[in-house]
Amino acid sequence: MDFSRILIIKPSSLGDIVHALPTVAALRRRFPSARITWLVKREWAAVLEGNPHLDAVLALDLLPKDWPAAWRAVRAGRFDTVLDLQGLLRSALLGWISGAPVRIGFANGREGSPWFYTERVPVPSLSMHAVDRYLITAKYLGADPGEVEPSDFPLPHDAQAEARIEVLLAAAGVQAGATLVAINPSARWDTKRWLSESFATVGDRLQQNGAARVVLIGGRDERHVGKQVMRAMRTAPIDLMGQTTLKELIALLRRARLLVTNDSGPMHLAAAVGTPVIALFGPTDPARTGPYGVGHTVLRSGVPCSPCFSRCCTNAIELECLTSIRPENVIEAAMHLLEQPLNVQNSLPLLFRSYE
């Protein structure tokens, strides 16, 4: 089979797109002359801008009214191979509609998606990290991913975005070279959110002892969570929630010395650009979706119901999996990372700590 026109289908979400980047890098090494296209939701297309392993980005809107245009777009690509990394009914349908004679997806894909594949790739373990799971498809096509390198996560460098971040920080009184800690208090699920008051305690302690300036990050629709944190703080953080584009957020995370966060898309962006992460995990499993690579710390509770993968907590003590993690635990981990030289900080192993 001539793999000359390859379509990667991975429309969302932000973290999943970041996880799939090494798969495309591995495919490029295996097929240096192939034309590789990535189908992505328009809202996340900026993550793929300038990716050296891609020839094209097919940025689409995928609401029901947009499907006729999406069908025409995938048909026009005349692809010979489709890799469906989303593993859902609509992504499998897009691959089928493309007319590609080879359509590859996971054997355990959801919503009946495997019915639309010509080849099904088995997943040996449900507990493997998403980065490694996506790489299985590249291996299936003969690629040798080897050791995943930081260069396999080529997020965009945008001079205008970097300049904009420096302007925002300067307006907040942050001097060049000052230590900056980003805090992301939100997440898509309510059950993945550590208490706003706990984030506030961490932010206050870091600013009161002079360890760092704290900047709150998040989307425009998450500003209500940021306001809860700010109301609970005694010191004033830099509030950039809802004020950055995706490329500006990437630039800010590169500028930060550390990110304290729930399980979220910004967590994966930070890990991809090499910024150390302190991640708070409750209902989800860090073995599957934790920050990838070295230099990060994952804090989780030891309660037996975690991970439950549920958006609704049914435990007798609501959100015990997160409330068992105390602000002092996070402050201790943050100070440990901030006290390390940068060259040491980025080479520390991934640490898991449980609190009961």
Image (spheres, rainbow, N blue to C red):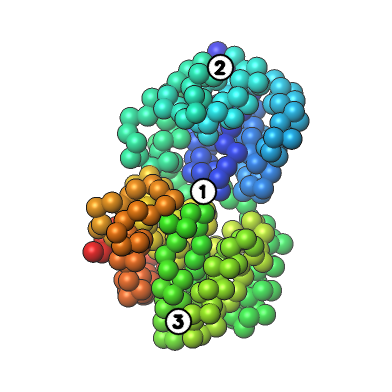
Q: CA distance from mark 2 to mark 1?
A: 27 Å
Look at label 1 and name its amino acid: Gly
Q: Residues within 10 Å of mark 1 (few under 14, many from 20)?
A: some
* Residue holding disc 1: 15
Question: In terms of sequence position, does the residue under pointer 3 or pointer 1 come before the other?
Answer: 1
- The relative height of residue 234 versus residue 16 in the rendered view (above or below) is below
Quadrant of the image occupied by residue 132 = top left
Residue 22 screen position, x and y as percent:
49, 40
Left or right side of 159 for 300: left
Q: CA distance from mark 3 to mark 2?
A: 55 Å
Quadrant of the image occupied by residue 210 = bottom left
* Residue holding disc 3: 204
- The relative height of residue 343 versus residue 13 in the rendered view (above or below) is below
Look at label 2 and name its amino acid: Val
Look at label 3 and name its amino acid: Asp
Give the number of the mark in front: 3 or 2.
Answer: 3
Which residue is rendered at x = 51% and y = 85% of the image?
A: 235
Left or right side of 305 for 253: right
Image marks 3 and 2: residues in contact by CB distance under 8 Å: no
Residue 275 screen position, x and y as percent:
47, 61
Q: Nearer the viewer, residue 189 or 7?
A: 189
Which residue is rendered at x = 46% and y = 35% of the image?
A: 134
Q: CA distance from mark 3 to mark 1?
A: 28 Å
State the mark number for residue 102.
2
Q: Helix, strand or loop at disc 3?
A: helix
Which residue is rendered at x = 62% and y = 18% of the image?
A: 100
Left or right side of 328 for 140: right
Which residue is rendered at x = 54% and y = 19% of the image?
A: 116
State the mark number for residue 287.
none
Is residue 105 something that shows in the picture? no
